[in-house]
Image: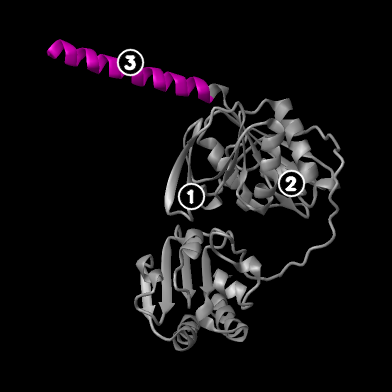
């Protein structure tokens, strides 16, 4: 019996040793391409989450940027820790992030660099681009990952975050989008990556950029703000939303968000929507008023560090996830809270 037990222990030790050696060997072979976003010659710092995710895989990490002024963006990105090299393509044709010409561009540089993993944020840009890249490479995309278990195994939420799926891929090149709130951006100073020009296939783009209508604000960006205040259907009208939420946000130095119900009712612009079909946020403080806590909304904010809620219904589902709850009429409590914060 003791001999059998000893044999079992030795076998287990050998298996663990082989796995460790295999992982170490893979780390030496792995090479990640982190696709970064830039707009009007400025780097989107939130897209650096792809670099953080890449560090979990081991091996070298190369960043990629394209558009007008891409070289200066590449030099800025090269200061982020964790990157060995930044590849750039300076061409105004890529400024708007159109997937129709971005996909051939990316495939050309992926094939040239022989990367094992290609990562980008699970943003509108990433969700539009990466399926085309995966199709051109004849591999399956892995979307919205929140954790990396190994070089071929990833964790992602499904059913609005009510279930967690572990996905294993045998594809030669893994095409992945990462949830930014699960991988905080690395330090943007202290890195010393080399910068080199990439290959530009100059693929014809069948899509023409017509225009965009953006809601501009001096407040922090919703996706990366450390504090967010959100309003829901309980505010009853756009007038009340505009009357109560901006002063509260200004008193806190916070970004403004909204539930899908508020957006669908016309209280707020759809760029402010937080939830499964909106933006995922994970601020230090998430303060919501008039939001019941539907699953769709919780999927986009439940990773917040502190959740505070104001609702007149003591049985509202939002109180089940809130760290701090205030039961009361928001039309009284929000102005009162705003005044106290100003003081």
Q: Which residues are magenta?
A: 1-27
Q: CA distance from mark 2 to mark 1?
A: 34 Å
Sequence-earlier tag: 3 or 1: 3
Residue 80 seen from this side: yes
Q: Measuring 67% from the left and 71% from the top, which residue is drawn there?
A: 218
Left or right of residue 23: residue 205:
right
Q: CA distance from mark 3 to mark 2?
A: 47 Å
Residue 317 screen position, x and y as percent: 39, 70
282 magenta-colored = no
Q: Judge the density around disc 2: few (<14), some (14-19), many (≥20) Cα neighbours within 10 Å.
A: many
Coloring scheme used: one colour
| Depth order, front residue of 91/267 | 267
Residue 206, compared with residue 341, is above or below; it is above
2 magenta-colored = yes
Residue 158 - label: 1
* Eye-nearest disc, 2 or 1: 1
Q: CA distance from mark 3 to mark 1?
A: 36 Å
Q: Judge the density around disc 1: few (<14), some (14-19), many (≥20) Cα neighbours within 10 Å.
A: few
Q: Judge the density around disc 3: few (<14), some (14-19), many (≥20) Cα neighbours within 10 Å.
A: few
Circles 3 and 2 in contact, beta carbons < 8 Å:
no
Residue wearing tag 3: 14
Residue 167 screen position, x and y as percent: 48, 37
Residue 228 screen position, x and y as percent: 53, 68
As drawn, the residue found furthest toward the top would be 3
Examine the image and state in which quarter residue 176 appears.
top right
Residue 73 - label: 2
- Assign a secondary structure to mark 1: strand
* Eye-nearest disc, 3 or 2: 3
Sequence-earlier tag: 3 or 2: 3
Residue 132, compared with residue 245, is above or below; it is above
């Amino acid at each position: 019996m003791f001999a059998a037990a000893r044999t079992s222990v030795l076998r287990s030790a050998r298996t663990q040793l082989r796995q460790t050696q295999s992982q170490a060997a893979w780390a030496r072979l792995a090479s990640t391409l982190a696709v970064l976003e830039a707009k009007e010659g400025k780097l989107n710092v939130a897209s650096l989450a792809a670099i953080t995710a890449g560090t979990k895989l081991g091996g070298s990490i190369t960043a990629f940027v394209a558009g007008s002024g891409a070289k200066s963006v590449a030099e800025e990105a090269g200061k982020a820790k964790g990157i060995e090299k930044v590849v750039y393509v300076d061409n105004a044709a890529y400024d708007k992030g159109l997937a129709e010409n971005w996909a051939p561009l990316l495939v050309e540089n992926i094939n040239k660099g022989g990367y094992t993993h290609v990562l980008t944020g699970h943003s509108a840009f990433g969700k539009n681009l990466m399926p085309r890249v995966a199709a051109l490479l004849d591999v399956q995309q892995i979307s919205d990952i929140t954790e990396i278990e190994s070089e071929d195994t990833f964790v992602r939420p499904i059913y609005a975050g009510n279930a967690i799926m572990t996905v294993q891929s045998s594809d030669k090149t893994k095409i992945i989008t990462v949830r930014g709130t699960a991988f905080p951006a690395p330090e943007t100073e202290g890195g010393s990556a080399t910068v080199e020009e990439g290959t530009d296939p100059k693929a014809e783009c069948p899509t023409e950029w017509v225009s965009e209508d953006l809601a501009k604000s001096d407040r922090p960006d919703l996706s990366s703000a450390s504090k967010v205040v959100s309003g829901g259907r309980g505010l009853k009208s756009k007038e009340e939303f505009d009357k109560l939420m901006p002063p509260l946000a200004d008193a806190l130095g916070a970004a403004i968000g909204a539930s899908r119900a508020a957006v669908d009712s016309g209280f707020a612009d759809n760029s402010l929507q937080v939830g499964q079909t909106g933006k995922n946020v994970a601020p230090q403080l998430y303060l919501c008023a008039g939001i019941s806590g539907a699953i769709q909304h919780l999927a986009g904010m439940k990773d917040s560090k502190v959740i505070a809620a104001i609702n007149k219904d003591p049985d509202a589902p939002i109180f089940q996830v809130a760290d701090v709850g205030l039961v009361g009429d928001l039309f009284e409590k929000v102005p009162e809270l705003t005044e106290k914060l100003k003081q």
